């Protein structure tokens, strides 16, 4: 019996160590070797961030990301608990893929309503049940390691870039200070190519 207990303890210890060493992948699109690296800090409950994903991002993707000219990294700057939970869901598969993130922004008006976090979480569950992303939302929301990763993004943004609003773009380590329209972004990027 002692031998079985020791084997089980060894197995559990090994599993927990491998889990704790699991790196959280950033959500990134584009050519990893692109000359231009955009970091966007955003909050999933931010209406302006939603507008970026609907009005600016599609042209940015078509004209710069898909052509290999730009790499974009989506980083977290949650403004509230609902945004934190949604960010955990966006990162839940930990595969660096942006599909869930874009889904959340495209359906923002469906889930960001409610007067309590429980109502908002319930809205998230409803939209995901109908879309079959093959994730367990409860496990995502309760994932402490994912939460730490998301909050570390926010802390870094505040310390490194003195960031206090979303969305904020950092292009090749410099804050984009102009109004965030595709026209302004395009002019800036074309000068850098």
Image (cartoon, grey):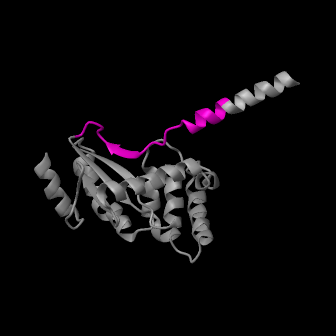
User: Does the magenta segment cover residue 24?
Assistant: yes
173 w.r.t. 86: above or below: above
49 w.r.t. 159: above or below: below
Is 189 left or right of 65, judged from the image as shown?
left
Q: Quadrant of the N terminus?
A: top right
Q: Quadrant of the C terminus?
A: top left
Seen from this angle, which residue lies furthest top?
A: 3
Query: In x, y percent, where is residue 10?
Result: 72, 27
Seen from this angle, which residue lies furthest bottom?
A: 115
Q: Which residues are magenta?
A: 14-34
Residue pictured at 26% horizontal, 36% vertical: 33
Pick the residue in front: 26 or 17.
17
Is 172 left or right of 147, judged from the image as shown?
left
Pick the residue in front: 138 or 3.
3
Query: In x, y percent, where is residue 124?
Result: 56, 63
Q: Is residue 61 visible?
A: yes
Image quarter of residue 19: top right
């Amino acid at each position: 019996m002692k031998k079985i207990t020791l084997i089980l303890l060894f197995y559990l210890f090994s599993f927990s160590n491998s889990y704790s060493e699991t790196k959280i992948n950033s959500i990134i699109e584009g050519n990893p070797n692109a000359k231009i690296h955009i970091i966007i800090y955003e909050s999933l409950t931010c209406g302006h961030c939603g507008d970026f994903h609907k009005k600016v991002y599609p042209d940015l993707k078509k004209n710069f990301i898909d052509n290999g000219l730009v790499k974009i990294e989506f980083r977290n700057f949650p403004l509230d608990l609902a945004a934190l939970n949604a960010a955990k869901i966006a990162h839940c598969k930990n595969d660096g893929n942006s599909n869930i993130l874009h889904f959340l922004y495209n359906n923002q008006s469906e889930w960001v309503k409610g007067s309590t976090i429980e109502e908002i979480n319930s809205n998230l569950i409803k939209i995901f049940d109908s879309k079959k992303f093959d994730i367990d939302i409860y496990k995502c929301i309760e994932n402490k390691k994912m939460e730490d990763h998301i909050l570390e993004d926010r802390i870094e943004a505040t310390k490194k870039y003195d960031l206090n609003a979303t969305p904020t773009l950092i292009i090749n380590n410099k804050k984009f200070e102009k109004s965030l329209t595709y026209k302004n972004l395009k002019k800036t990027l074309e000068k850098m190519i």
